[in-house]
Each structure stands twice: as C-alpha cells, then as structure tokens.
C-alpha cells in the first residue's frame, strides 16, 4: 500500500548528507513493511536483521568497531551481499544499547552505507541521540492514504483540489460516506488491507482488539509494576472520557477516590510512547502556547480512530445518529491528525466557559483556533469571541458540510482534516 513516508525515504536515499535513519512509531503502523518494500523497490539488495534478543548481533556490535569488518560480518549473517550504495541494511526492533552504538558507526562513514533502524520505543530516542542519525516518526494511515488503499485516489484528489482552491467538493457525499468507513476501520495497515479486500467489520474488530492488546503490552516496559495496571485503566477509560460533554480527563471516571498523583507516571509513559495523545487547557492564548498550558487540566486521545470506534461497538448506522459518539470520534480524529502533523495540542476555555476545541501554533508562530461542530446549526460564539479577543485573522471550523468561508473562518468538512498536514505553515 502506498504511504506518504515513501517520499521522505526517497529524499533520504539521495541526500548528500544522509545518515542512518531511525524510524520510530507504535507497533502495527507498517514500519517494517514500508522499509522492506522501499528497499525492494529502490535497492539491488536488502539485508534485514531482527535485533530483538539477537545475541549474535549484540556480540558483534559490542566487539567490532571497524565498518569494513562489520559489513563483512553482516553479509555472512544475512547471506546478502553488503554493497556500498546498492544494499539497504534494515535493523528492526532496535532497543539494545550495544546494537545502537554499532549502528551509530555507520553514521561516521562517507554516506556509502544506507542504514534504517526501526523501533517502537520512544525511550530508545535517548540512546540514539547524536549527529550520527536522522529521525522520522511514522504513524497509522491517514484518511488520504486510506482512500488510496481502497482504490479511491480520485476522491482524495478532488478533496485536495477543493481545499487548495477554496471550492466546494464535487464528491462531498461520497467522501463523507468513505470517511465513516475510515472512522470505524482506522488507519492500521493490516485493518485497512482487510477492509479493502472483504469489508467484514467483525473480522476487522478482531485485528483491532489484538493491536489494542499489543499497545497495552508496551506498558510492560514501564519501570514500576503498579504503573502497568494504571496505564491500562487510563487507556480503557478514554472512550468514556471522550463521550462526556466535558471531555477533560477526569480521574473519577477511573473509580471513586482516584487521584492525579496515582496516575501521573502512567499517563506520562503513555504520552511519551505515543500510546495516547494529550491536549492541555489554556485560559489565555499568547506565544508560545506552551507557556499558557495548565498541567493539571488536559484531554487524552487514542492514536487511531479504529481503536476508539471498536470500544463503542460502532456501526455506520449508529455513527450517523449518535451525536455523542460522533463528537468523540470527530474530536479524536482531529487530535491525532494534528499531533501526527507535528503540532502540540491545546484547547481554550475561558472563565466564561467559552471553549475552542483546538488551538495550535504553526511553524511561523501564528496562533490558529480550530472549532468542531457536528450540527449545522451550532453557534459559533466561542470561536468569534476568541478571534476578537486575540485578534486572530485565520481560523477553522470543522463540520459535516461542504467547504466554505465566512468572515475569516474557513469551514472544512470533517473528512478534509488531512489537508491541514502540509498547509498550516
């Protein structure tokens, strides 16, 4: 399946200052498949190494510091010729420090060896730090990639055309219907592929349940055993948290008498490892937004819409009529799309209870509010108050209606959030 990261990989391959590349992302987002497919399409040889509990590689990298001898040994181990510029070396499931130090050696070479390391552990970033590496975060498939996968590339192109040219989308109804499929399916490649071939939701849920369990198992890497149980509680509570009118994370949902101090480490671990995404409350909006955040007031989101819809036992028919669940899924979708585009999340709530669902700061320092509304007749008072108070000239309002613009507010259909990935600069 076509992935957007492929463009980045092609650029990396021809980069004059190319370094070994670390691809980091949660499990099951397609890191290994993408790297192997990229190697198959663009190199004469691909040498793949699963480093998980690989004592042979660990001993090799621990003892050998010569690039030439390392290449010779790796060729013998993989039974693949290690040819400069013609072989892609892929090291998967990398967490061991000795192996990381060994991979770093290729960063000192003159760009002759092409090396990709893959990990799902954010903690590994600390071990990889240095000028010897380049980094790329990989996430699940967005709605545009989903459309590509199910053979609807033309729909994706028409959505982008409408966004870029400030026009209404000629396939609006069709795009919204497919978006409902995406909310239920999610963006995990294995689930998307299964949907594209047989479209049986029961089978898809079995895959998503397994992936959700895999994500929960990442908590086993937590240093404190009690944090494992609490982390699972937090993840399991997110559907209930988002279904509330007030979507702020409330410890009371976890059980009577639960306190923030009990869950602080677990939540930080989940956020650090991208198992959940966090949005902080702000009462004022000034640059930088990070200086305005309230650390004890936040919302949590899941990184995949399909994992969330599974917890609701959702069907397309129910999605169309259940406004609480729809609001939860829409807000979750906007949140993970923005985070995966590189933005920190904030939501605005004034003393007068006016709330804007998302406030971000783009790479030029501009503060941009994004408001979500699921009903066409919903008022825009909160967004208007925010724009007037902070002299904001650009804002987005997300609805189920077609593209339009009113008084400096761009109205985007919910399915077009992926267009913001490359536009909010």
Image: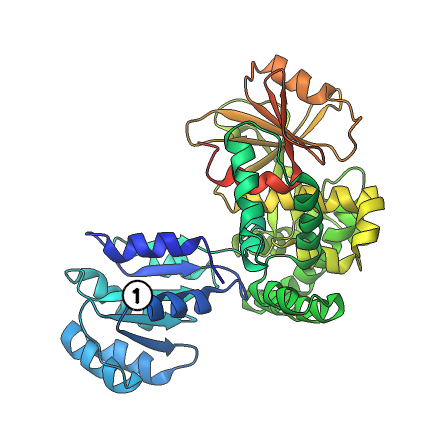
Q: Is residue 291 above or below residue 179?
A: above
| Residue drawn where x is 65% and y is 48% of the image | 301
**Visible residue check, residue 172:** yes
Where residue 352 sits: x, y (%)? 75, 20
User: Is 330 positioned to the left or the right of 75 in the image?
Assistant: right
Where residue 85 sits: x, y (%)? 20, 66
Where residue 13 sits: x, y (%)? 27, 58
- Quadrant of res 98: bottom left
Q: Is residue 282 above or below residue 71?
A: above
**Visible residue check, residue 257:** no
87, 146: nearer the viewer: 146
| Residue drawn where x is 17% and y is 64% of the image | 112
Residue under numbered circle 1: 42
249, 32: nearer the viewer: 32
Q: Residues within 10 Å of mark 1 (few under 14, many from 20)?
A: some
Where residue 28 sits: x, y (%)? 55, 66
Q: Quadrant of the C terminus?
A: top left
């Amino acid at each position: 399946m076509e992935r957007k990261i492929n463009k980045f990989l092609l650029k990396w391959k021809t980069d004059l200052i190319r370094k070994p590349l670390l691809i980091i992302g949660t499990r099951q987002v397609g890191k290994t498949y993408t790297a192997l497919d990229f190697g198959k399409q663009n190199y004469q040889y691909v040498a793949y190494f699963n480093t998980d509990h690989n004592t042979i590689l660990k001993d090799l990298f621990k003892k050998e510091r010569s690039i030439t001898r390392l290449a010779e040994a790796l060729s013998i181990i993989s039974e693949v010729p290690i040819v400069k510029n013609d072989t892609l070396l892929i090291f998967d499931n990398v967490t061991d420090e000795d192996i990381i130090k060994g991979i770093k050696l290729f960063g000192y070479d003159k760009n002759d060896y092409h090396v990709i390391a893959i990990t799902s552990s954010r903690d590994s970033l600390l071990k990889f730090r240095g000028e010897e590496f380049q980094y790329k975060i990989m996430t699940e498939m967005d709605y545009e990639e989903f459309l590509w996968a199910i053979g609807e590339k033309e729909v994706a192109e028409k959505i982008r055309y409408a966004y870029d040219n400030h026009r209404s989308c000629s396939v609006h109804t069709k795009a919204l219907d497919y978006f409902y499929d995406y909310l239920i399916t999610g963006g995990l490649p294995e689930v998307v592929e299964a949907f594209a071939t047989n479209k049986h939701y029961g089978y898809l849920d079995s895959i998503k349940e397994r992936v959700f369990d895999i994500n929960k198992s990442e908590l086993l890497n937590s240093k404190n055993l009690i944090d494992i149980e609490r982390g699972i509680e937090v993840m399991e509570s997110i559907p209930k948290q988002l279904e509330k009118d007030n979507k702020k994370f409330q410890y009371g949902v976890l059980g009577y008498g639960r306190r923030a101090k009990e869950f602080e480490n677990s939540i930080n671990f989940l956020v650090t490892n991208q198992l959940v995404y966090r949005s902080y409350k702000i009462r004022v909006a000034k640059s930088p937004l990070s200086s305005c955040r309230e650390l004890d007031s936040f919302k949590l989101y899941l990184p995949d819409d399909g994992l969330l819809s599974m917890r609701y036992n959702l069907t397309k028919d129910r999605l169309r009529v259940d406004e609480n669940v729809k609001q939860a899924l829409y807000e979750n979708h906007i949140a993970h799309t923005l985070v995966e585009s590189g933005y920190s999340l904030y939501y605005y709530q004034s003393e007068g209870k006016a709330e804007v669902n998302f406030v971000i700061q783009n790479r030029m320092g501009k503060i941009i509010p994004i408001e979500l509304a699921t009903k066409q007749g919903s008022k825009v008072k909160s967004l208007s108050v925010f724009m007037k108070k902070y002299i904001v000239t650009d804002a987005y309002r997300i609805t189920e209606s077609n593209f339009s613009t009113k008084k400096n507010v761009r109205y985007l259909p919910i399915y077009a959030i992926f267009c913001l990935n490359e536009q909010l600069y």
